[in-house]
Image (spheres, helix red, strand yellow):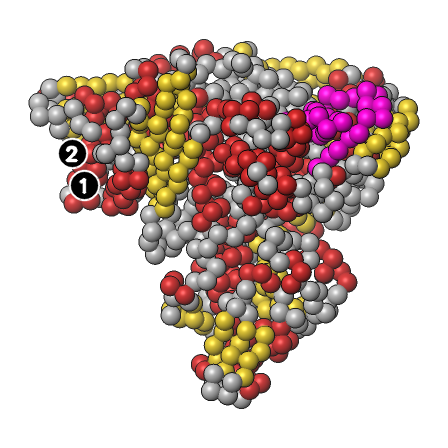
Amino acid sequence: MTTVKTKLDRRSFIRSSALAGGGLLLTFSWLAPACTTDSPKQLTMPDEWYELNGFLKIGNNGAVTIMSPNPEIGQNVKTSMPMIVADELDVDWKFVMVEQAPLNTDIFTRQLAGGSQSIRQGWNGLRMAGATGRRMLREAAAHEWKVPVDEITTEAGVLYHKNSGKEAGYGEMASAAAELTVPEEVELKDIKDFTIIGTSRKNVDGQKIVTGKPLFGLDYKAEGMLIAMIEHPPAFGMKLKSFDATEAKAMPGIIDVFSIKTYNDDYQMQWSDVTAFTELVAVVGKSTWEVMNAKLMLNVEWEPIAEDNAQGVPAGFESTADHYKKMEEAAAKAGREQRRDGNPEEAFKNAAKVIERTYTAPFQAHSPMEPMNFFADVKDDFALLAGPTQTPEFMEKTVAARLGLPLEKVDVQMTRMGGGFGRRLYGHFMVEAAVISQQVKAPVKLIYSREDDMSYGIYRPAYHALYRAALDADNNLIGFHVRMGGIPESPLHANRFPAGSVDNYLAESFTVESNISTGAFRAPGSNFNAVAEQSFLDEVAEAAGKDPIQFRLDLLKRAQENPVGSNNDYDAARYAGVLEQVREKSGWDTNSEGKNRGVAAYFCHNSYVANVVDIANKDGKQVIEKVYASVDCGIVVNPDAAVNMTEGSIVDGIGHAMYSELTFSEGQPEQNNFDMYRLIRHAEAPKEIEVHFVENNIDPTGLGEPPYPPVMGALANALYKANGERYYHQPFVKNSIG
Amino acid sequence: MAVFNLNINGKQHEVDVDPSTPMLWVLRDHLDLVGTKFGCGIAQCGACTILVNGVATRSCITFVDSVGDKEITTIEGLSENGDHALQKAWIEEDVPQCGYCQSGQIMNAAGLLNANPSPSDEEIEMAMHGNICRCGTYTRIKKAIKTAANS
Ligand code: FES
Ligand code: FES
């Protein structure tokens, strides 16, 4: 048992005496029983709820409500975060209900979905919240039974005093516990004593999802709510000049048509305020279809942005062919040096063999299945916003600044999100909804059509990488050089593997300016690095006549035993661990005969993943028969959900490497819906996926992103085995539907 | 505007809308049946799938004036208590990630099972090809359809 200080800020434990039960609270808190499928009948309604801290409430009958602090985007935090609290509280999961917490930075920290950090950064706080609740219940029982608190044990929501034979359910002690002072320090469970963490629990919203209950932002409804849509410039490098709304306004059901500015002129943007289009035309009406039709009747004139605009955005209309040319030109020159070990120039000069390859990847649109949308109800002195956002905390500030309201007068509620993948880190649509509501003086739900969504920007940047490897006469890797850039940012992580494993190493970066807006996309940078680097290492291993897994393991051994440089930001032993596990589980050494297999491994967002992909040739077509994954993300909180997340990332990674590409002509995106922009579909997914986790007691790290990048490299390497072709440019299958 | 009497989930509903309104928006905006989702609006993603006389149909391109007295089933009406074999299988296999595509996937699968109660893997892949899951839950969806078919 570890004892820890309850170093959560005092404010984070809102003390509250008995919260009146019944009525209001129950009507919404009872909606999400975690045990929908197991035993709904065992749950009965408590008469009163007692709040022990901001994370949990206990009913007088032993029912427990646990708040899930972070936005739920499909990464399963709404189930797995409360599981952590419940385990330390030591309750039966059957009696737990989960509620989405409101945005409240006094109680919760980092209410953000991004960087695969929810579980990793929430871990200690969630454990402490549960453990604090348990401690207070034990103290209440000790007081009541007049025995030392150390003699009180708990199990599955029941308090015991062994010597006297006394026992009581949590519900019986909840009222007294809520009156106690929050303890200064609490005991955390030993990992071996976990009863919920490490066991598979079903998605707490599962039943609602499969019965079509309103859960998502797009489903939000309020009394008197109007529907709004926006029209944005058709091309990057353009802005609004003028518009004629006469015809649109005359359409049935239309309330108003006007232009809006997303930000005030003197506003200092924060990182989540990305948008290329700061002035838009808004159409507001009574129903979605009416607004969609009126939008078609808009007469808008657009004009090129000024050369010397205040935002410092480059003017002009860009095209895909120019993008690749510019990156190629930039890569032909020395870049900004980010890391140097030994003497790479000398190594390449003395090499017996030099391998040089170039890799590219296109812009991609996030395209979560739920298009961007948000609800806003802005009054003179208060604004309520509700909908899908990965960054409620940041966007609350932006919205408050734009409306000129103090922060505490802006309330942001989080709905379940129909995916995000980074797209909903950038909440311009929240500001737009708020400004539109302010203008029409009514509650408004802003909805993007798929076309609006896909052509709005905030794309995954386009990337380019030049890799060079130097082998000596004995096929040892003596030099490694990477020059990596993109539009508008370089994806380079200079201190990641193979840095640290090669004596002579050089990493450079470059960037190319653009007026196309970009943003974080599932595993930013890594989503390109993994495929480029892992394909390249495959070729280098082949040139060196070595087995691709052993080749990587040898390098990792060097990095572990005698690392080059001191700045290597990965753990070589854990890296090797996933490769070794996937080698064993896939039968790499024993069962590869007749198989077209490729391997890759990558480390990002604090977790390690290795894949083996098997491809079969069937009737002249390549079919992905099986994908193996080995994952090291520390303690696995909810195993089956973690498998699901890994499977999904694998499918998603294969899809984006194979099919997805957004191109431009004269600043205009050439794909704006799924008839032209290709996402992976059922028949293209692997026939089988087998996921393994490395077992250890390391605090958990994230899983939303790490399993996404490496599979692309393993896929490229397996395709090479299947058809003899190396894949240097994404998408591997050129973008045409059919 | 025109008045339509629609047979949805076994009940009669009257709506007064423009005849060109897709069923998707009739359901979502006018009848508060929001389980049917908007994903693309052009029959490319399957999020809006409903059953029309038992056949899986994209509601985003099914105009209200084409429906007549045909039986419409939405995810809300697939079963009374959320216990259709497919819904149970979806829970059993814990299919959803974000969950947004899943009502469309389930309704499309319901259409498939109506036509073919024990589909092969290939038949499932073909039938489900029009339903995108951006979260990549395809392997679980296939498993859940097989679980439901076998139950
Ligand atoms: S919304 Fe109908 S198929 Fe996409
Ligand atoms: S579960 Fe997210 S789109 Fe399918």
**Chain of the residue that carries numbered disc 1 in the rendered image:** A
Q: Residue at x 21, y 26 (%)?
A: A541
Q: Amino acid at mark 1?
A: Lys
The answer to whether one can see residue A206 in this image is: yes
1 vs 2, front mark: 1
Labels 1 and 2 touching (C-beta < 8 A): no
**Lower sequence index among marks 1 and 2:** 2
B69 inside magenta stretch = yes
Query: Under 8 Å from ligand 2: the CB of mark 2?
Result: no
User: In the picture provided, is A543 more to the left or to the right than A39?
Assistant: left
Q: Name the foreground residue: A11 vs A47.
A: A47
Q: Amino acid at mark 2?
A: Asp
Q: Name the foreground residue: A173 vs A315.
A: A173
Q: Residue at x 67, y 41 (%)?
A: B84
Badge 2 crowding class, 10 Å Cα cut-off, few under 14, some 14 to 19, many 20 or more, is many
- Which image quadrant is residue A214 in? top right
The quadrant of the picture occupied by the C terminus of chain B is top right
Position of A431 relative to A638 (above/below): above
Residue extent of the magenta highlight: B46-75
Give the CA distance from mark 1 to mark 2. 13 Å
Per the image, the residue denoted by label 2 is: A503
Per the image, the residue denoted by label 1 is: A557
Q: Secondary structure at mark 2?
A: loop
User: In the picture provided, is A527 more to the left or to the right than A138?
Assistant: left
A708 inside magenta stretch = no
